[in-house]
Amino acid sequence: MSGVIVQNMSFKPGQTLTVTGVVNPDSTNFAINIGNSPEELALHLNPRFNAHGDNHTVVCNSYQGGSWCQEHRPDGFPFNQGEEFKIWITFTRDEFKITLPDNSEIHFPNRPGAEKYNYMLFEGGVRIHGIEIK
């Protein structure tokens, strides 16, 4: 898996991160990670086509203190291999509100409780075309 790392781009409460990209035709999964370092991820958004024993499942989690926390698995899977997507992630002090390509929403808690994140990692079977914070 190759990845794109974005550092020193502050993501603060009240802002929305818009990610656009294209899922690779042979993708098994991809991930959008937001935190302050690879060791401290507040949000791990992982759409899985066929990976880790899951088929067409979105898994959200956080990684703290060297361990994965409890997974959150919302219903629905609005991604298709070989197709473009857009995801909006709105950050508040309490949660990440993730709006998926079909306009469904995931509400995932801001477990670390930080007021700013400046590390993003995009990895897996995906080509990221745009990253914007407003």
Image: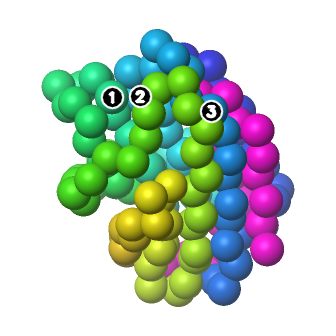
Disc 2 is placed on an element classified as loop
Relative to 55, say whether 97 is above or below.
below
Tag 3 residue? 22
The number of numbered discs placed on residues in the rendered structure image is 3
Residue 100 part of the magenta segment: no
Q: Residue at x 49, y 39 (%)?
A: 31
Q: Amino acid at mark 2?
A: Asn
| Disc with the residue nearer the chain's start (3 vs 2) | 3
> How busy is the neighbourhood of tag 2: few (under 14 within 10 Å), some, or many (20 plus)?
many
| Quarter assignment of residue 28 | top left
Q: Which residue is mark 1?
A: 49
Q: Nearer the viewer, mark 2 or mark 1?
A: 1
Vertical relation: 7 (above or below) 107: above
Give the position of the C terminus as an image quadrant: bottom right
Q: Main secondary structure of the magenta part?
A: strand
Q: Earlier in the sequence, mark 2 or mark 1?
A: 2
Extreme left residue here? 53
Q: Which residues are magenta?
A: 111-134
State which quarter of the image contains the N terminus.
Answer: top right
Query: At x 58% / y 45%, what residue is drawn?
Result: 85
Q: Position of residue 106 (x, y in %)?
A: 37, 68
Mark 3 or mark 2, whichever is nearer to me: 3
**Dot 3 lies on which element?**
strand
Q: Is residue 15 above or below residue 59?
A: below
Looking at the picture, how far across and down is residue 27, in whole percent? 46, 20
In primary-sequence order, the first of circles 3 and 1 is 3
> How packed is label 3: few (under 14 Cα within 10 Å), some, or many (20 or more)?
some
Disc 2 designates what residue? 29
The amino acid type, in three-letter code, at marker 1 is Phe
